[in-house]
Amino acid sequence: MNHSSSFNRRTFLTATAAASTLTLLKPSTALTAEANSTIELGLIGCGGRGRWIADLFAQSGKYKLVACADYFQDRVDAVGEKHGIAANRRYTGLSGYKRLLEAKLDAVVIETPPYFHPEQALAAVEAGKHVFLAKPIAVDVPGCLTIAKAGKLATEKQRVFRVDFQTRANEHFREAVRLVHQGAIGKLVMVEAFYPWAGGGRGAPPPTPEEQLRQWYYVLPISGDFIVEQSIHSLDVATWVINADPLRARGLGGRKVRPPNSIYDHFAVQYTFPDNLVCSFTCIQSIPFVKDEIRVRAFGAEGIFDADYYTGVMLRGREEGVRASVGDLYTGGTVVNINEFHEDIVKGNVANPTVAPSVRSNLTAILGRDAAYSGEEIAWDVLLKRNEKLEPKLKGLKA
Ligand SMILES: NC(=O)c1ccc[n+]([C@@H]2O[C@H](COP(=O)([O-])OP(=O)(O)OC[C@H]3O[C@@H](n4cnc5c(N)ncnc54)[C@H](O)[C@@H]3O)[C@@H](O)[C@H]2O)c1
C-alpha cells in the first residue's frame, strides 16, 4: 500500500482550517448557550494565575466572583477591588480558605502553590463546593492520593471536580490521542517527551517562611521541583497517549545554572511502561535562546504522533491523520475548561474524568523526580508504598 496516498483517506485536518477556533472567540462567546445559570465563585490563591483566570471566569458571563482568599492582604485586595468583592469576603492567612468555604458560594477555583492543593481541594469538596484546580495537583504521593479521594468524593456528593490541563481540553489533542488509542499508529514502539524552556530563572528559596509563600517556585516542598510543577504538562500528554502507569523509572539530573539550595535545572528520566515500552523524558530550564517546547512524540509501528503545546498536533498513520495548529493554547485550553466546568455543573455531569489522569501524570512526574534525586531505579509500587510526604516550613505563619 502506498503510504502517502492512503494518508488523506479519512480524517485529515489542515493546519489553517483547523486552527483552534476558540482562540479566535472571546471567552464569553466560547461558553455554551445552554449553560446559562450564574455560578457563584470563590478564588483561592490571588497571585499571577489566580488574577488572570479570575478575569477569564468573569468575562465568560457565566460566573460571579463573590469571595477570595490568599495568604496576603494585598493579594486579596487587588482581586477584591477589581471584581467588587466586599471586604468581609476577602480572607487571609493560611486558613483563610476555610472561612471562604463557609461562605455561600457554589464553586472554588484553586490557584495556590501546589503543596496546598490537596488539603484545599479536599476541604472544598467536603464543604460541598465544585472544584476547579490548577495543575500540578500535588507535590508528593500522599497529596496525589488525597486528590484521588477528593475526586471520588466529589462524584459521590454530585459535585464537579476539574483539573485545568490545557492540552486535555484541546480538540486536536483529543482527536489525535483518540486515534492513537484506536490503533491509528499501530502498537507503540517508543515514546519521547521533552520540555526545554528558556524561562524559570536561576533563583534560590527565600529565607523566611512568609517570603517563601510569595516566591515558592524554588522551594522544593512547595513547588515539587520543576519536573512536577512545570514539566507535568509534557508528562501528562505522554501518559495520556500511553494510557498506563509506568512500571519503573531511572533518572539523572542536577543543578548547573541554579544555586545548590535551589531546585534542579535539568532532568533526564527513562520510564518503562507495560509491554517494555520505553518513554525517554528530558526537561531543562533557564537556558538562553532555547526554543520553548512541551512536546511528545510517540512512535508507533504504523506511524507517529507528534504534539507540542506551543505549535500544534500532528498524527500520521496508514489510514488517518491530524495536522492542526493549536493557536494560543494557554488561553484557549483554559477557556474550554472554564466552559466545560460550567456545563458539567449545570448538567450535573459528575464523572470528573480529569481527576484520574491527573493523578497518574503527577505520580509519574514524582517517580521521575525521586529516581533522579536518588540516582536509583524506583518501581511505581515502591513509590506508592513509601508514600513520602514533603513538608515546607510553615511555622510562625499567620493562621
Ligand atoms: N498553564 C497552566 O496551567 C498554569 C500556568 C501558571 C500557573 N499555573 C498554576 O497555578 C498555580 C499558582 O501559580 P501562580 O503562578 O499564580 O503563583 P503565584 O505565586 O503568582 O500565586 C500564588 C498565590 O497563592 C498565595 N498563597 C501561597 N500560599 C497560600 C496558602 N497557603 N493559602 C492561600 N494563598 C496562598 C500566594 O500569596 C500567591 O498570591 C500553580 O499551581 C501553578 O502551577 C498553571
Image: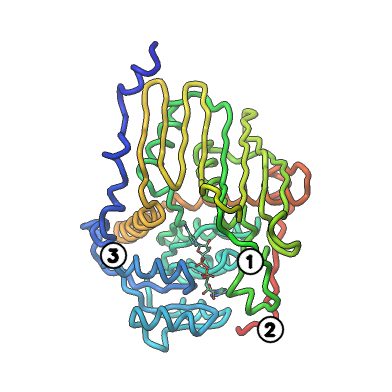
Task: Please give the name of the residue rendered at 67% of the width and 38% of the height, measured from the top-left corner.
Answer: 270
Q: Position of residue 85 (x, y in %)?
A: 36, 82
Mark 1: secondary structure: helix
Mark 2 — residue? 396
Count of numbered badges drawn on the protein? 3
- Work out which quarter of the rendered image holds the N terminus and state it: top left
93 relative position to 326: left or right: right
Q: Is residue 99 left or right of residue 338?
A: right
Residue linked to disc 3:
60
| Residue appearing at x 62%, y 43% in the figure | 282
Name the residue: 51% across, 58% down: 135
Task: Note whether 145 is above or below 183 in the view shown.
Answer: below
Gap in angstroms between the C-alphas marked 2 and 1? 16 Å
Tell me whether circle 3 and circle 2 mark residues in contact (CB < 8 Å): no
User: Label for residue 222?
Assistant: 1
Give the residue type that dot 2 points to: Gly
